[in-house]
Each structure stands twice: as structure tokens, then as C-alpha cells.
Image (tube, rainbow, N blue to C red):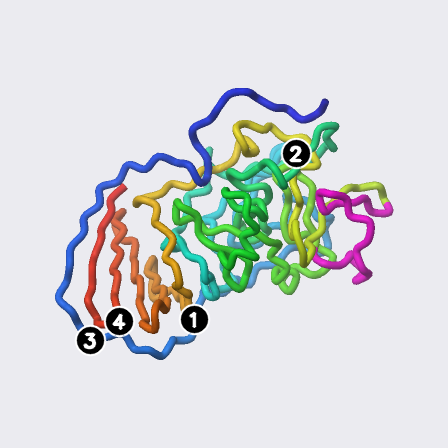
Amino acid sequence: MNTRRSANVLLQGALLVAVTACGTRESVEPTAALETAVPEPTTAVNEGSADAALPSTPCNAFLENTTTDCTPDTAIVESNGLPATHNMMVGIVSWQQQVPLPQAYTGDNAWRIPLVPELSDDPISGRDDLFRGAIALAVNGVPIFNALNNRGDDAYLAGELDHWGGHTGRGDDYHYHIAPTHLQEEVGADQPIAFGLDGFPLYGLTEADGSPVVGLDAYNGHFDDDGSYHYHATETYPYINGGMRGVVDYRDGQVEPQPNAHPIRPAGEPLRGAEITAFSQTGPGAFSLQYTLDGGTYAVQYAIADGTYTFEFIDPSGQRTVETYTP
């Protein structure tokens, strides 16, 4: 048996981190009602791309909004968990009132990808396991979670995902639940769009030469002509790698080690009937999200400055409520 498992129960995970934060809440006098027109979303654009002249490994495949340092057996990838070349959140119709915040996936809390992956005699299926934490890392530094959410439901079919296949978890951490195939436009069809945390690459919907993908196993993987194993994206479940076909350390429902998100406020509750219609970055460390509910337009405007997180909630009448958190 190749898969290294531990019976130790960890109390930390990307979605189950205890939060210690000081929060304050105050009401502000109403101002003018929100404009009903939805502004065009904006996002910072990063011009980085993978070096197609080199073999695709975790040491050279990640984009320039990340930092990669390789040891003889591990690629250590740092990121803030936010995409640099696409917007977020728009299109979600099942929302838990979380918003994307930059994460400190750096130093000891960075991503670690094996450089010499090994096939396991005891692979782990995502159908009935791996409901905590990430199972892969996209080449733009955004983690990819199981296609099934922590309730075992298909997150895509449940309407929980935005137009790019992502959403934010209970720690305000942005991540994908389906393959970010849009990244092929940046890296090319012959390059990986992600790497499983077991080290095997995840390619898009076609083979490198554009031919159809055939013969995938239950983990959305197969061998190429050189005998190398890799995963593929699919348009139907499991969308991404359907689990861990390679050797990993597994503890209490997730692959270890992996970075933790660090929530700064209590987790939200589902807001039935809400649909996110716009999201934009309005300045350095400042963001705006708009959603509709029962015919009205609401907004969440938030900013990070000097270690303080300020959230302003605006209802259709212009009534504003402010919350501040200092981790």
C-alpha cells in the first residue's frame, strides 16, 4: 500500500479554522439608494504565462502572480489565492455571504507539490472522501477543491459557483470546484492548467495536440504515449481530478500538509434567493460586490488597510451597516 495515511485527527483545515477576531458593528444613517445599473466588473491583468519551451513541471508551469521555489523533490508555491486575470463571484445563485479575501499562502503556509509523483496502490476517491481542503492547485495559484462540497453535493449543479468555476469558502477564501479551463487561453492547450496535490498534472478538455481525450479512469486520469500519468478536465462530473490517484499523506479528510485559510470574521449563512451580479476591485485592497434579492439591489463594499478589515453593507434604500475586524 503506497498511500501514507495517519489516524491522527487534525483540527485545522482550509474550511475548519478557528477564528479569533475582534468585530464591531454599527448602523449608519441612510444615504442615496444604490444605482440599479450594474457597473462593468474590473480586474487586474497579469501578463505572465507558462514557459512552453520547457517541460511542464510544477517548477516552471505556474504563472507570474505566484512564486515558486523548488527543492530536489518538492515545488513550494506561494500565492494570495486570488486570480490575476479573471473576475470572481458573478453568477453565483447559492451564496453563503462570503467574499474573496487575499490569503497568506506563503512561507510555512505555502503549497507543496511533489516533483516525482508516485501512483498509489490505495487511491482516494473524491466521491466519498476529500471533502476538506484542496485537492489541486491551479497554475494561477488558486486552490481547487473537490467537485462535491462539504455536504457531498455537486457545487456546480447547486449554483454555488461563479462564471469561472469558483466561489469563496467559510474563511472568505476563493477556490475552484471545477476545472479552470479558461486558463488554457493563457498557457496553451498543451500545458497543464493545474497540478494535483499528489503531483500529477491536470490538463484541459483535449490532449496536447487537440485530439479528443479517451480512456479516462474513475479519477479523470490516464497514461500518455510515454507512459506518464496525468489528469484531464471534463465538462461533467468529476470535472477535475476525481480524487488522489497518487501517493499522498492523508489525515482526517484532506491531503496534508497544505495551507490553511485564516478567516478574520465569523462565517456567513446561506442567503436564499440572492444572485451575485457584479464584483470589482475598486482600489488597493478595496472591493465591491453587488447582488439582487427580492427585486432589490444590495452591495457589500470592503477594504483592507493597516491590518483592519472594514465591511460596509448597503441595502436598496441606502441604509449602511459597517463591521470592522482586526485579527
Circle 2 crowding by C-alpha within 10 Å: few under 14, some 14–19, many from 20: many
For marks 4 and 3, the one nearer the N-term is: 3
**Residue at x 80%, y 42% (from the top left corner):** 228
The residue indicated by pointer 4 is 316
Q: Can residue 136 be spotted in the picture? A: yes
The residue indicated by pointer 2 is 124
Residue 285, by quadrant, is: bottom left
The residue indicated by pointer 3 is 32
**Residue at x 26%, y 56% (from the top left corner):** 311
Q: What is the magenta range? A: 204-225
Q: Tell me whether circle 1 and circle 2 mark residues in contact (CB < 8 Å).
A: no
Circle 3 crowding by C-alpha within 10 Å: few under 14, some 14–19, many from 20: few
Relative to 279, 118 lies left or right: right
Q: Amino acid at mark 1?
A: Pro
The residue indicated by pointer 1 is 41
Q: Secondary structure at mark 1?
A: loop
Circle 1 crowding by C-alpha within 10 Å: few under 14, some 14–19, many from 20: some
